Image (cartoon, rainbow, N blue to C red):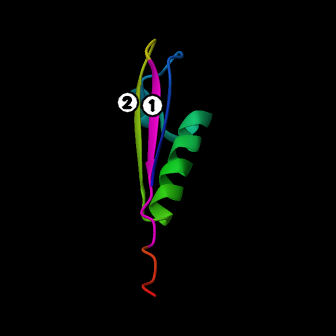
Amino acid sequence: MVVEVEDDGRGFDVAETARRGDRADHALGLSSMRERMASLGGQFDLQSQPGRGTKVAFRVPLPREASA
């Protein structure tokens, strides 16, 4: 399953946020999202630029249905 959320808002510098680490509240939120996706065997992708908005994508493998 893939869920993508995108906006055309303020955006932010992803590299700067990663560099500051958990000192920024939103950096802690981003690391939490990555951890949650990893715990589900999924992936978290983030794209953002100041003044150009943000896009996040969550990819989670769904279990295959058992054959009848």
Query: At 52% across and 42% down in the image, what residue appears?
Result: 30
What is the x, y in percent for residue 39?
Answer: 49, 65
What is the x, y in percent for residue 65?
Answer: 46, 77
Which of the two discs, 1 and 2, labels the residue nearer the N terminus?
2
Q: Reply yes or no: does residue 67 show up in magenta.
A: no
- According to the image, label 1 marks what residue? 55
Give SS at disc 2.
Answer: helix
Q: Reply above or below: 65 against 28.
A: below
State the count of labels: 2
* Mark 1 → mark 2, Cα distance in angstroms: 15 Å
Query: At 44% across and 42% down in the image, what residue appears?
Result: 57
What is the x, y in percent for residue 62?
Answer: 45, 66
Query: At 45% across and 58% down in the image, what residue appears?
Result: 60
What is the x, y in percent for residue 19?
Answer: 41, 34
Magenta stretch mostly in which secondary structure?
strand
User: Can see residue 4?
Assistant: yes
Magenta region: 53-63
Query: Residue 15: which numbered mark, if any?
Result: 2
Pick the residue in front: 47 or 22. 47
For the residue marked with disc 1, what is the amino acid? Lys
User: Can see residue 24?
Assistant: no
